[in-house]
Amino acid sequence: MESTLSPATLSGKTVNGISIEQGMVVHVVRCTETQLKSGMAKQVYSLCGRTHDKNDYWSLSHAAHVTCPKCRKKIAN
Ligand SMILES: [Zn+2]
């Protein structure tokens, strides 16, 4: 399956059903087209080697601005 890169934040932590996005680091994850369309990815790693906790997932948002310095460096190369 073809893989693609997408900006993503760690999700799963919500307050009143609203994701806490402020102050969250935006990483870049390698995911599939299917995951990209669904807007979430599980069991994938960011370019800087991070992954989510057991009950969390990556929330994919292709319009997000990548803020993780390590991931930014990787996509720049
Ligand atoms: Zn990162």
Image: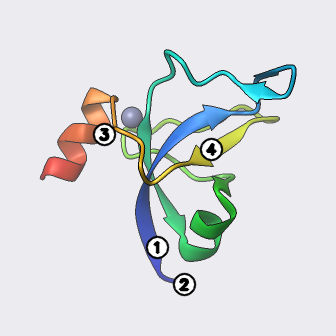
Figure quarter occupied by ligand 1 = top left
Which circle's residue, 3 or 1, is located before the other in the chain? Answer: 1
Residue at the spot 82% in from the left edge and 35% down from the top edge: 55
The residue under label 3 is 71
Q: Secondary structure at mark 2?
A: loop
* Quadrant into which the N terminus falls: bottom right
Q: CB of mark 1 within 8 Å of CB of mark 2?
A: yes
Which circle's residue, 2 or 4, is located before the other in the chain? Answer: 2
Disc 4 from disc 1: Cα separation: 15 Å
Disc 2 from disc 3: Cα separation: 23 Å
Q: Amino acid at mark 3?
A: Cys
The residue under label 1 is 3
Q: Secondary structure at mark 4?
A: strand
Q: Amino acid at mark 1?
A: Ser
Graded by Cα atoms within 10 Å as few (under 14), some (14 to 19) or many (20 or more), the crowding at tag 1 reads few
Q: Amino acid at mark 4?
A: Trp
Q: CB of mark 2 within 8 Å of CB of mark 3?
A: no
Disc 1 from disc 2: Cα separation: 6 Å
Q: CB of mark 2 within 8 Å of CB of mark 4?
A: no
Q: How is the image coloured?
A: rainbow
Residue 17 place in picture, x, y as percent: 85, 28
Q: Amino acid at mark 2?
A: Met
Disc 3 from disc 4: Cα separation: 15 Å
The residue under label 4 is 58
Residue 44 place in picture, x, y as percent: 58, 53
Disc 3 from disc 1: Cα separation: 17 Å
Taking 12 as reference, is 77 left or right?
A: left
Q: CB of mark 4 within 8 Å of CB of mark 1?
A: no
Q: Quadrant of residue 67?
A: top left
